[in-house]
Image (tube, rainbow, N blue to C red):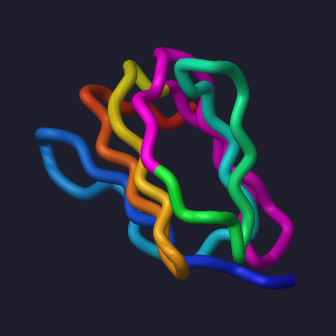
Amino acid sequence: MNTFELKISTPDGDLYNGRAVKLDVRGLEGELAVMAGHIPFMTALKPGHCDIMLEDGSEKQAEVDGGILNVAADSVTLLASGFRWK
């Protein structure tokens, strides 16, 4: 599976920095799924779920309080105002 570099940061520090296959979050216009090779964009996030599929097929789930998502050519950065692993 193709992967991308994912970094999740909050005002309290970095909470995740590693490879991911897919990221699901809620943007201002609705649900978003980001995978490797996605077109670059930036958007604000609404409070809601954050699901991350890892290279081994496992998933990590969390709740995000809102923030900014930046999708670049080979990396994704989620800057969250609050973030809690489930």
Q: Position of residue 34 (x, y in %)?
A: 69, 55
Please say if 53 is above or below 47: below
Q: Position of residue 32 (x, y in %)?
A: 70, 37
Say left or right for 7 vs 47.
Answer: left
Residue at the location (69% across, 20% down)? Answer: 30
Quadrant occupied by the N terminus? bottom right
Residue at the location (41% across, 54% down)? Answer: 70
Q: Which secondary structure type mostly characterizes the magenta part of the structure?
A: strand
Q: Position of residue 28 (x, y in %)?
A: 53, 19
Q: Nearer the viewer, residue 70 or 78?
A: 70
Residue 56 located within the stretch drawn in magenta: yes
Q: Nearer the viewer, residue 63 or 75?
A: 75
Residue at the location (71% across, 76% down)? Answer: 37
Magenta stretch in the rendered image: 42-63
Q: Position of residue 51 (x, y in %)?
A: 68, 42
Say left or right for 25 vs 84.
Answer: right
